[in-house]
Amino acid sequence: MDRIAITGGAQLNGIIPVSGAKNSAIKLMAASLLTSEPLRLTNMPRLADTRFLGKLLTRLGAHVDEREGLDGSETVLHAPEITSGFAPYELVRQMRASFNVLGPLIARTGQAKVSLPGGCTIGARPVDLHLQALEALGAKIDLHEGYVYAQAPRGLKGAEITFPFVSVGATEHAMLAAVLADGVTRIHNAACEPELLDLQICLNAMGAKVEGAGTSTITITGVAKLHGATHSVIPDRIEMGTYAVAAAMAGGEVQLTRARPELIDSLLVKLEEAGAGVIRTEDGVIIKRNGHRLEAVDLETQPYPGFATDLQAQFMALMTTAKGESRIRETIFENRFMHAPELMRLGADISVSGGEARVRGVEQLEGAEVMATDLRASVSLVIAGLVARGETTVSRIYHLDRGFERLEEKLGACGAQVRRIKGEPESDIDHD
Ligand code: EPZ
């Protein structure tokens, strides 16, 4: 397996272009199953997760064509026919978001057999809300031997869906299924994450009638058929936030471009509070810190527009060398502090109790061998490695490759000493 080695101490200075959002791209790719015409997605990130989902879609009957377009990478997905409604365990287990093909398959063909995804390192992550939403839309759902057997031979019907708490995946899944349902669906207590609005824009370009994404009520008036479309994937707010934190950690001045800073306001406010310089620009943000030490600040993860759980690990890395004690509360996932013991191997002073971590800033981290446990945890270790004395080696970086496009190249272009050490090829790897 590949590893990443970082020699700490270099400041970051330069420009980092932000890629298209992984967590939007994979739901948009699933939307291609809803039409027999081609869906062209531009500003596509090239990641292990998108390649992986491409493989599953191919098995279901789609043609997946990756190209270099004028506006960066693009993928054309075309499913003239669904040749199989079966998503096997080995594929869904390896990437949970594969489960989101269930709704489009039922909506288009009236049936599907899709494996339950199981848990992952950051939490149990059940899919009960996804299934409740599909049942509300009239799908008959049976669970046997780890599989969801779903049927809606006469099509799905519009419904009132009220989620008991906010779920990004369940909201997206309900939207993906309801666009072809007969009648009006209203999703109450919907997730407001920007990726939902991106999905709405794409579905509407395909002929759907969706309103309200980005607010807590989404209204979908079902249509009989969708058609092909071209859609540009929203910039990745988590990648942007990650490099913003990296710049604040290493010091120097980094300009993030092709980005939308308003999507990470909750992070930028915390960076400013900690003492980093933040200048919002037309297509991104400049982050700078010149020598002075940052101050510890507290945070609590929340659904959008609150502080994103996907940036919590990176911010914890930043706090390991800040002045004072930072309290970090994780409220979305029950086990999302796996990076804490790894950061402690680098000399961080952290104690975790339940959903709260207390990080007491130290003057200096020291390089060590550490292990990535999930996607965002992995990148927090790279961020810590940027300032650790000597060399930090991060193993199991297949997690990192799931969600960060050309990470070494992007950081390297700003002066970071980051290199990949090639290892044995990986097999049978789980993708959370
Ligand atoms: C999405 O996961 C993202 N993944 C996650 O990013 C992100 O951390 C999360 O949203 C929160 O923002 C993708 O978009 C592929 P949820 P999702 O449903 O949709 C519980 C990354 O690193 N829940 O909003 O799975 C669940 O266990 C990943 O890129 C149920 O109980 O998150 C969690 O505690 C990691 N039942 C909470 O809700 C359900 O049916 C929120 O999860 C569904 C969720």
Image (spheres, rainbow, N blue to C red):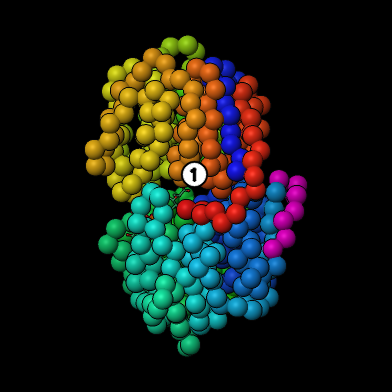
Binning the other alpha carbons within 10 Å of mark 1 as few (below 14), some (14 to 19) or many (20 upward) gives many
- Label 1 belongs to which residue? 375
The type of residue carrying mark 1 is Leu
Q: Quarter of the image for the N terminus: give it.
A: top right
Taking the view exactly as shown, the residue that stands out farthest to the bottom is: 154
Q: Position of residue 408 (x, y in %)?
A: 63, 33
Residue 273 seen by the camera: no
Q: What residue is rendered at 65% in x and 73% in y?
A: 61
Where, by quadrant of the figure, is residue 128 drawn?
Answer: bottom left
Point out the stretch of residues depicted in magenta. 64-72
Q: Position of residue 355 (x, y in %)?
A: 26, 42
Check if residue 245 falls in the magenta segment.
no
Check if residue 66 falls in the magenta segment.
yes
* CB at disc 1 and ligand 1 closer than 8 Å: yes
Specify whether 171 is left or right of 250: left
Specify whether 163 is left or right of 365: left
Q: What residue is rendered at 43% in x and 59% in y?
A: 169
Where, by quadrant of the figure, is residue 156 drawn?
Answer: bottom left
Which secondary structure type mostly characterizes the magenta part of the structure? strand
| Depth order, front residue of 271/151 | 151
Q: What residue is rendered at 53% in x and 42% in y?
A: 396
Specify whether 238 is left or right of 338: right
Count of numbered marks: 1
Looking at the picture, does residue 432 appear above or below residue 77? above
Q: Position of residue 315 (x, y in %)?
A: 40, 32
- SS class of the residue under badge 1? helix
Taking the view exactly as shown, the residue that stands out farthest to the front is: 424
Q: Quadrant of ligand 1?
A: bottom left
